[in-house]
Image (tube, grey):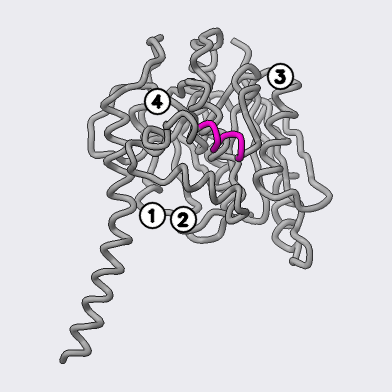
Amino acid sequence: MTLSPIALFVYNRPGHTKKTVDALSRNLLAAESDLYIFSDGAKPNASDKRVFEVREYIKTITGFKSVTRIERDSNMGLAANIMVGIQQVIDAHGKVIVLEDDLVTSPFFLKYMNDGLQIYENEQQVISIHGYVYPVRYVLPETFFLRGADCWGWATWKRGWDFFEPDSNILLQKILETNQSQNFDFNGSYPYTQRLTDQIEGKTNSWAIRWYASAFLNNKFTLYPGKSLVSNIGGDGSGTHKGFDHQLFKPFSTDPVALTFQKPTQNITAYLAFADYFKTLLNPSVWYRIKRKLNSMLRQDQ
């Protein structure tokens, strides 16, 4: 088996980057894997001190078959850095494992990724392999498929990335024209359609929503593990995307995931589990605002 190269995207969080790399280097296949590190430049009129610290650190990284460092001369932004970087590695190797600087992985992450890439290499309906799974209340199978794609520790082939559509207008139009918004939003439990609208209106700049929509509209499937092999440590407000619920950042599983070939079809139990989880993720914030308002009214009455 030819191992997939790893693309790691970093910016200005030296502490997070070190934790991500330390965990990655403890993976079983790290010493046999090529690592590409894409370091974005500082934003205009912003201090480049932490960007410099990250770049000094990545010069010291060892423990991989090879380490290639790409330092951007200026700030591309997270989305552009990722999209361009993925394309670069895909063009050179035909496949890629993608990580960002706040994703800490299980020692079995690379094995799961490479096994998945090998097993489903010629299965055209499978667009990607994903390493994170939400802390749902349902019991999930060892591995399962969902329609679409995801963004926290994942891998794909050239044939998969070729479906990526960067134009949010095209994606949103197709979803609305085909009346798929409800399904796209996981049975209305999470506002993914609104995220596309936000992208169009310039309220956000997310490559991930476009990746999900591209896979969804082409009826492609992503393989998930029943237990997460990734923990996101970026919930401290230090990153580009803020406001995530802290329950998302659970520790990864310390057990390996067994992969056997299965037909790529939507797992209904997992779909409903995700929808159920999204509801619990969004509702507490609503309840908190209501509770805070009620407490304020009670204090005024006393």
Q: Quadrant of residue 275?
A: top left
Which residue occupies the foreground of this view, 127 or 92? Answer: 127
Tell which circle, 2 or 3, labels the residue nearer the N-terminal end: 3
Q: Which of the labelled discs sits on residue 172, or is there none?
A: none
Residue at figure coordinates x 55%, y 60% from the top left: 238
Residue at figure coordinates x 21%, y 87% from the top left: 299
Q: Which of the labelled discs sits on residue 246, or is there none?
A: 1
Which residue occupies the foreground of this view, 233 or 267? Answer: 267
Mark 2 secondary-structure assignment? loop
Which x, y percent locates residue 256?
Answer: 39, 25
Tell which circle, 4 or 1, labels the residue nearer the N-terminal end: 4
Instruction: Give the residue at mark 3.
Output: 93
Q: Are marks 2 and 1 in contact (CB under 8 Å)?
A: yes
Instruction: Give the residue at mark 4.
Output: 146
Q: Crowdedness of circle 2 by 10 Å Cα count: few (<14), some, many (20+)?
A: some
- The answer to whether residue 25 of the structure is visible from this angle is no
What residue occupies the far front of the structure in this picture? Answer: 177
Q: Are marks 2 and 3 in contact (CB under 8 Å)?
A: no
Q: Viewer-nearest of labels 4 and 1?
A: 4
Mark 1 secondary-structure assignment? helix
Residue 277 part of the magenta segment? no
Q: In whole angstroms, how far apart are the C-alphas of marks 3 and 1?
A: 36 Å
Q: Crowdedness of circle 3 by 10 Å Cα count: few (<14), some, many (20+)?
A: some
Q: Are marks 4 and 1 in contact (CB under 8 Å)?
A: no
Which residue occupies the foreground of this view, 163 or 238? Answer: 163
Amino acid at dot 1: His
Mark 3 secondary-structure assignment? helix
What residue occupies the far left of the structure in this picture? Answer: 302
Range of residues picked out in magenta? 169-174
Q: In whole angstroms, how far apart are the C-alphas of marks 2 and 1?
A: 6 Å
Amino acid at dot 3: His
